[in-house]
Image: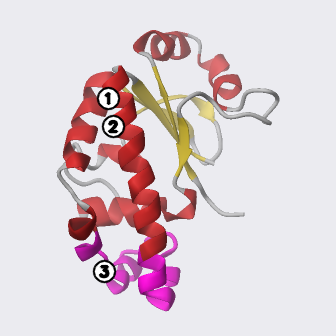
Amino acid sequence: MGMVACFAATDAATLRGLQADPGLIQDFLYPDDGEGEPPHYVDLDKGWHCIHFMLVGEAEGGEPPLSWAILGGDEVGDEVGYGPARFLQPDRVRAVATALSSMDDETFKRRFEPHAMQAADVYLSEMCVRDGDEALEYLLENYRSLVAFYRGAADRGDGAILWVS
């Protein structure tokens, strides 16, 4: 199945409530006994780590606000997949949305360096080396989903919850 990066946008009041009672996070992220999705949900499938690398040029960390887009936020609660959920407050969501809006498809595509990803031990980098342009199209499609997610969240004034499932 693999590791999938997931994102849910929500208002600041809901974020505060979940931070105050982290025991509610699991039910929020996996409603209907895991059969549903939280509101304003998107996932980047398995391409998340490659996209992070393309945004910041590193496997971990990087310069904010782009480094916040996938691996940012403050950890809250217990594990909800591969580690705890991470919360981004609305001001950081706006900063990420602004930074992503300045990177068009062509700029993003120019950052595709499969061998550098592989050398940095980026998850799914082997696929990028093997599949080349086909892998890049897969990453671009998921990148567009990420941009739309942050644009919508920022427009609503929402914060975000990030997790790897």
Is there any visible trace of residue 59 in the rendered image? no
Residue receiving disc 2: 151
Is there any visible trace of residue 20 in the rendered image? yes
Dominant secondary structure of the magenta stretch? helix
Q: Is residue 35 above or below residue 3?
A: above
Residue receiving disc 1: 154
Hey, which quadrant is residue 89 in on the image? top left
First in sequence: mark 1 or mark 3?
Answer: 3
Q: Is residue 89 above or below residue 68?
A: above
Circle 2/circle 1 CB separation < 8 Å: yes
Which mark is on residue 121?
Answer: none
Local secondary structure at mark 2: helix
Residue range in magenta is 109-136
Residue receiving disc 3: 113
- Is residue 77 inside the magenta stretch? no
The 10 Å Cα crowd at callout 1, few under 14, some 14 to 19, many 20 or more, is many
Q: Is residue 83 above or below residue 23?
A: below
Q: CA distance from mark 2 to mark 3?
A: 26 Å
